Image (cartoon, grey):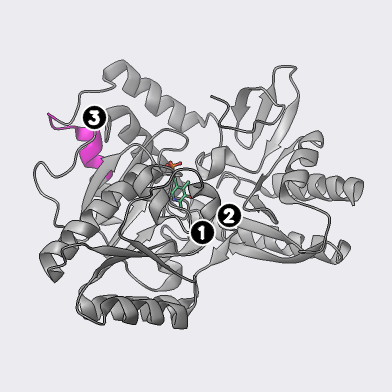
Amino acid sequence: METYQRLPLKVIKGNGCWIWDEKGKKYLDAIAGIATCSLGHSDRKLRKALIHQLKKIQHVSNLYQIPEQEALAEWLTKNSCADKVFFCNSGAEANEAAIKLARKHGRLKRGIEKPIILCAKSSFHGRTLAALSATGQLKYQKGFEPLLEGFEFFNFNDAKSFKNRFDSLEKNGPRIAAVLIEPVQGEGGIHLGNKDFFKLLNEICKKNQILLIFDEVQTGMGRTGHWWGYEYLNVEPDAFTIAKGLGGGHAIGALLVKEMANVLGKGDHASTFGGNPFACKAGITVAKEIEKRDLIQKSKLKGQQIEQSLNEIINLFPDHFRETRGIGLMRGLVIKDNSKLTAQLVVKEALKERLLVISAGEKVIRMVPPLTINDREIRLLIKKLKKTLQRIT
Ligand SMILES: *Cc1c(COP(=O)(O)O)cnc(C)c1O
């Protein structure tokens, strides 16, 4: 339906950090399917596990017990602050589940008839209607009104803005069911959560029995150099959503929740494909391979390497770049407002140097490579980016 503005590149195959077009030309991929292909393309171990799974069984529905789903749920609850998992197929869908959880929790625990979910401006939570209503960016919402009611907004990392919103909504009694927020805003321009701000959020939520829900769809599964973005913030959410990196490129999403916050019971939520054996096999394989290959620690180090090189680029092009932002292997190079460059222009021109990068908003060049990226590939990434910038500035 032409809902995408596609680049002129036909992708035929991939391996590790590399993809090939139909003419056999090779490109360095610093996008990884938008932060999804955690182990790179066509990883040998993931491939083997999935071929094995395909030969066993692919889908049965949640009418029955699914060992692969149980294994993944067990791994996730053992390795995070959560006790329970609901599986679905995407990030938006995971957030839909979180919104349902929040509303029911608000009704049951705070006696609110029309629960409100507080969200941050410049956030991104997905394209389905509830997730879109929770997204603090008008450009995604325009044309699709009326949006769902029950979402209010504050400025990200802004304690005053949050307190004002909170006080005015709660002055005549409980109205807020949950705060839904990304630990690091991804699509919104790679904005890191401020630790003091999140500490305050946590305190206010705990005190008032308001659920603190993190959207870790992009930050989860090692992307930040931690398993979960909340570790970097030192704040445990009551629930959080994941998707992108979980399946290593396969469709899977999940809502994770602490026991005490779990108000969803039998019949409250469901998904036909959610948690199917194939997707869960992908998830459990990705998780175990990240562990085995020590990719959390490596993401941290590789991220620092990229940051250092991006700072050198800023020094080379001081008229065009303001700063570099990010954590782990979630990196942004920020273009100055008065530069003629746009992120989209750099994305297009980098393609000619056979480099794939992505934008995050108009002025941020985003890099979210496979967690397996090596030193040589990082050097090539920077070299290609420099060449692109030399040509177009
Ligand atoms: C990508 C993303 C989503 C949406 O995920 P889909 O799988 O595209 O539905 C939601 N939240 C965040 C933070 C994301 O980065």
The image's mark for residue 99 is: none
Question: Cβ of disc 2 within 8 Å of ligand 1?
Answer: no
**Quarter of the image holding residue 380?**
top right
Viewer-nearest of discs 3 and 1: 3
**Residue 85, placed above or below residue 209:** above
Q: Residue at x 65, y 43 (%)?
A: 30
Q: Residue at x 64, y 64 (%)?
A: 325
Residue 68 lies within the magenta run: yes
| Residue nearest the viewer, comparing 104 with 384 | 104
| Position in image of residue 90 (x %, y %) | 38, 40
Q: Residue at x 72, y 32 (%)?
A: 27
Q: Which residues are magenta?
A: 63-72
**Residue 243, placed above or below residue 80:** above
Number of numbered callouts drawn: 3
Is residue 77 in view from this perspective? no
The image's mark for residue 329 is: 2
Decide if residue 139 is on the left or right side of residue 22. Answer: left
Describe the element under mark 3 as helix, strand or loop: loop
Please state which amino acid type lies under the numbered disc 3. Thr
Q: Residues within 10 Å of mark 1 (few under 14, many from 20)?
A: many
The image's mark for residue 224 is: 1
Decide if residue 167 is on the left or right side of residue 135. Answer: left
| Position in image of residue 385 (x %, y %) | 79, 48
**Which SS does the magenta portion mostly show?**
helix
Describe the element under mark 2 as helix, strand or loop: loop
| Residue nearest the viewer, comparing 106 with 186 | 106
The image's mark for residue 272 is: 3
